Image (cartoon, rainbow, N blue to C red):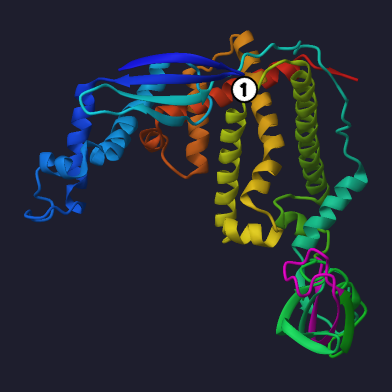
């Protein structure tokens, strides 16, 4: 294999890969064995015609496509490694020459890692964030926990926000019922905003046994076009109402939370709120500092690198949607988007992630950041616990590229530490 590198400018390069004729011949023979069963030749049983006969009938190019795929699959990663280029995008491939008896030549157009002219990253000024926790913050958090621990009790008093009602409903447009607008014995939490805006609010003050009419207007961007922007009337019958019975804030409740006294429980809540505020403050400082360094650093991001990041982000998003039982086709229908518009929407964040990553990697290099084997093992232990696996088993199924990604992530975390340890709050 011979690999030549051509600089295309703007951090794009073309790799010209030349494969010896002997290797092309081997690929053509493999292609023959792979494709012969689908080629019909009179006088021969299916799959039994010799290669020479097939090539005489259909021409030598009959196996070129399969052979070129075989060679490229077998060699393109090695070619990228041999080029010595730090490649940061998926390759765009093109066949330059394929002819029996001659070398096979193909090209790979790829983006290379941009050079970064790094701005000063020590002494970056960031806003000071207040991490103090007030008594009312603690009481508010305790109230939220009591709400989460509340028991649902049936009530005959007026509906309040947070109550749960079991209702029948039927919707009408211009006095006529519409498809999909009817439900029976539907459980609705008031304040959940699971119905059209204004629907739940109009149930507040009503009681079990009441029948009422609710006037609402469907939003302009409603997924069902025939209803979008339309005023509608819903006839509603309320069967039952269940309210929240809050637990008393006493020693018994504190004991349920694992504390001897209410005061100990309060102190723990305060401690947790402080930790959350400190983590949020660190994230704010981190985002602000990195953004300032990015803004003052210079780099030229190739479009192919951004496209690769966009594909990665959209694939991750599709996997998250699938985990929620929603396909990308359904998501695009609901949000009235297209693959092209999604890509355009994702591009700014993709470029920001790339710039952030390049800056942090450059800082790690400037600081000679290293990750010890002990630190790697600690991180692998954490991962194994998250996945409920044995660490050794996790390492067995983990490839070298995954381990290298973990090492790079740890290096970036250390680079962030350098930034924040030297940041100046004002």
- In the rendered image, is residue 4 in sight? yes
Residue 6 location, x and y as percent?
Answer: 48, 14
Rendered position, 323 above or below 57: below
Q: Toward the viewer: 30 or 260?
A: 30
Rendered position, 301 above or below 312: above
SS class, disc 1: helix
Image quadrant holding the C terminus, namely top right
- In the rendered image, is residue 84 in sight? no
Residue 122 location, x and y as percent?
Answer: 76, 11
Residue 195 location, x and y as percent?
Answer: 78, 71
Q: Toward the viewer: 341 or 51?
A: 51
Image quadrant holding the N terminus, namely top left
**Magenta region includes residue 329:** no
Q: Toward the viewer: 6 or 190?
A: 6
Q: Is residue 132 left or right of residue 322?
A: right
Q: Toward the viewer: 136 or 364?
A: 364
Rendered position, 56 above or below 161: above
Q: Going 75% across and 26% down the picture, which residue do you hit?
A: 286
**Magenta region includes residue 223:** yes
According to the picture, the residue beneath numbered tag 1 turns out to be 412
Rendered position, 414 above or below 193: above
Task: Please state the total of marks drawn on the protein image.
Answer: 1
Q: Is residue 380 left or right of residue 178?
A: left
Q: Going 51% across and 37% down the picture, which residue do you hit?
A: 383
Looking at the rendering, the stretch of residues picked out in magenta corresponds to 217-246
Residue 266 location, x and y as percent?
Answer: 82, 47
Q: Going 10% across and 55% down the picture, which residue do you hit?
A: 42
Q: Going 68% across and 25% down the picture, which residue do you hit?
A: 356
Q: Is residue 390 left or right of residue 110?
A: left
Disc 1 crowd rating (10 Å Cα; few below 14, some 14-19, many 20+) is: many
């Amino acid at each position: 294999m011979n690999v030549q590198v051509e600089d295309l400018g703007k951090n794009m390069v073309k790799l010209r890969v030349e494969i010896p004729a002997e290797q092309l011949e081997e690929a053509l023979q493999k292609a023959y064995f792979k494709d012969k069963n689908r080629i019909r030749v009179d006088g021969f049983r299916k799959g039994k015609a010799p290669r020479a006969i097939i090539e005489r009938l259909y021409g030598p190019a009959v196996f070129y496509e399969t052979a070129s795929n075989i060679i490229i699959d077998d060699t393109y990663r090695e070619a990228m490694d041999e080029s010595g280029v730090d490649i940061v995008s998926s390759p765009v491939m093109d066949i330059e020459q394929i002819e029996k008896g001659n070398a096979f030549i193909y090209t790979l157009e790829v983006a290379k890692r941009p050079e970064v002219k790094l701005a000063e990253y020590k002494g970056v000024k960031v806003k000071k964030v207040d991490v103090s926790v007030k008594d009312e913050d603690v009481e508010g958090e305790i109230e939220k926990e009591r709400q989460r621990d509340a028991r649902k009790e049936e009530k005959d008093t007026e509906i309040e926000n947070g109550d749960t009602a079991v209702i029948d409903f039927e919707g009408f447009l211009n006095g006529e019922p519409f498809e999909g607008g009817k439900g029976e014995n539907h459980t609705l939490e008031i304040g959940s905003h699971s119905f059209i805006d204004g629907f739940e609010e109009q149930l507040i003050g009503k009681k079990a046994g009441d029948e009422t009419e609710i006037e609402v207007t469907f939003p302009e961007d409603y997924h069902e076009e025939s209803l979008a922007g339309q005023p509608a009337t819903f006839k509603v019958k309320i069967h039952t109402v269940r309210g929240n019975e809050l637990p008393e804030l006493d020693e018994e409740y504190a004991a349920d939370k694992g504390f001897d006294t209410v005061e100990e429980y309060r102190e723990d809540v305060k401690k947790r709120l402080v930790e959350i505020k400190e983590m949020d403050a660190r994230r704010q400082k981190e985002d602000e500092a990195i953004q300032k360094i990015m803004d003052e650093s210079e780099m030229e991001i190739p479009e192919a690198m951004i496209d690769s990041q966009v594909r990665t982000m959209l694939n991750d998003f599709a996997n998250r949607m699938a985990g929620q039982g929603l396909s990308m086709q359904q998501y695009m229908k609901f949000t009235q988007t297209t693959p092209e518009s999604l890509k355009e929407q994702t591009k700014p964040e993709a470029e920001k992630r790339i710039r952030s990553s390049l800056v942090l990697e450059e800082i790690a290099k400037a600081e000679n950041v290293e990750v010890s084997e002990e630190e790697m093992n600690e991180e692998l232990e954490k991962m194994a616990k998250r996945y409920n696996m044995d660490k050794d088993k996790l390492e067995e199924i983990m490839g070298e590229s995954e381990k290298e990604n973990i090492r790079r992530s740890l290096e970036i975390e250390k680079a962030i530490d350098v930034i924040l340890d030297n940041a100046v709050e004002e």
